[in-house]
Amino acid sequence: MRAFCKILTALFVYVATATASHAEQPETLKIGAKAPDFNLPGVDGKKYSLKSFAASPVLAIVFTCNHCPTAQAYEERIIKLTSDFKSKGVSVVAISSNDPKAIRLDELGYTDLSDTYEEMKIRAKDMKYNFPYLFDGDNQSTALAYGPVATPHIFIFDKERKLQYHGRIDDVEKPTGTPNHTDARNAIEALIAGKPVPVPSTKTFGCSMKWISKEQGVQKEQAGWAKEPVSLETIDEAGLKELIQNKSDKLRLINVWATWCGPCVTEFPDFMTMHHMYRGRDFEFVSISADSPDKKDKALKFLQGKFASNKNYIFNVEDKYKLIEAVDPKWQGALPYTLLVEPGGKIVYAAQGPIDPQKMKKIIVENKYVGRYY
């Protein structure tokens, strides 16, 4: 019995320790410490460890991710850092340690991509990364060993793989700005020249790490959607035309759908994802039901089931041709129909049939009224 109690106690301590390690910010690696090894998959399908960079006199490891606006703001600079020092044998590697299941949709307002391994492949291809991009999001063991505070957070090691610098890449977040302090570049140059790093560590600014313990935040977010009111208002021809004119200051995504339209029903959750991602920005999603006015209750029930707390309308007359002409005279009439309208009424996207949700998210976030950066 005593032995059994000891086993239970040991198990409790192990679980408590493991939980704490994912619930709290781990200690950041100290200057002079040896680089902890890792064995992580890259977006190129290869596995990488410290041995993969054994020939490099300097190794820079950047903890970053897809979704963070600050991380995106530094992408070009990481690419440039890699190319500038390639001839010197310096290796740069990026690691994404965020748990994709711990990222709320309202945290994706500055991106078209979350932090899954598959989405990392897309981002690396889109941006033409010239460095390995590794995934640590399954158990976050590498991040727990290094202790990054935010994304991006760079760690620079000498030939013996002792840490000589960690912190920010430079002191200006926006890509259009000119930094006053290029700390990471200065550290690399000093190590190449065999000199001490002038500033061994700095604070780093960016998005917090998405530790596994934050998965409960996603569940709370989803539970909150169910409490938001869902309404369906009738709208006439004049109202539709005014909707398309978009006199607001927001980028407006409009989807015309119907409960009897299979593709409409199938793709509607994609619009809800975009609604929850971008509604905190200068963006709004509006749905227009092409159901007959006497089917309003059925359409509302569908919207309630999708937590559609956005603006929803149903055309107030049976004549669908009036609906077509009021929405867009170029529309041939097949459902679904989707428009993206800038403030002032400029239509920047109009298409009949189902959307490509990935393409649509990219169009939205790269529009000047939304954008990837602060």
Image (cartoon, rainbow, N blue to C red):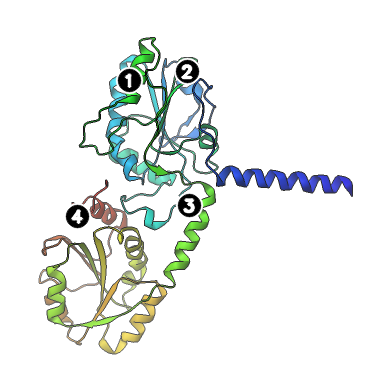
Distance Cα–Cα, label 3 vs label 2? 34 Å
Q: Position of residue 96 (x, y in %)?
A: 43, 39
Q: Nearer the viewer, mark 3 or mark 2?
A: 3
Circles 4 and 1: CB atoms closer than 8 Å:
no
Please tell me which residue is depicted at 26% across the width and 86% down the height of the picture: 292
Identify the mark nearer the N-term, 3 or 1.
3
Please tell me which residue is depicted at 55% across the width and 33% down the height of the picture: 145
Distance Cα–Cα, label 3 vs label 1? 35 Å
Identify the mark nearer the N-term, 2 or 1.
2
Q: Secondary structure at mark 4?
A: loop
Mark carried by residue 54: 2
Task: Give left or right: position of 326 versus 161.
Answer: left
Mark 3 Cα shell of 10 Å, populated few (<14), some (14-19), many (≥20):
many
Q: Secondary structure at mark 3?
A: helix
Of residues 190 and 49, the one nearer the viewer is 190
Residue linked to disc 4: 369
Residue linked to disc 1: 186
Distance Cα–Cα, label 2 vs label 4? 45 Å
**Amino acid type for the residue under numbered disc 1:** Asn
Q: Nearer the viewer, mark 3 or mark 1?
A: 1
Residue linked to disc 3: 102
**Amino acid type for the residue under numbered disc 4:** Tyr
**Amino acid type for the residue under numbered disc 2:** Ala
Distance Cα–Cα, label 2 vs label 1? 22 Å
Say if 358 sits above or below 27 in the image. Answer: below
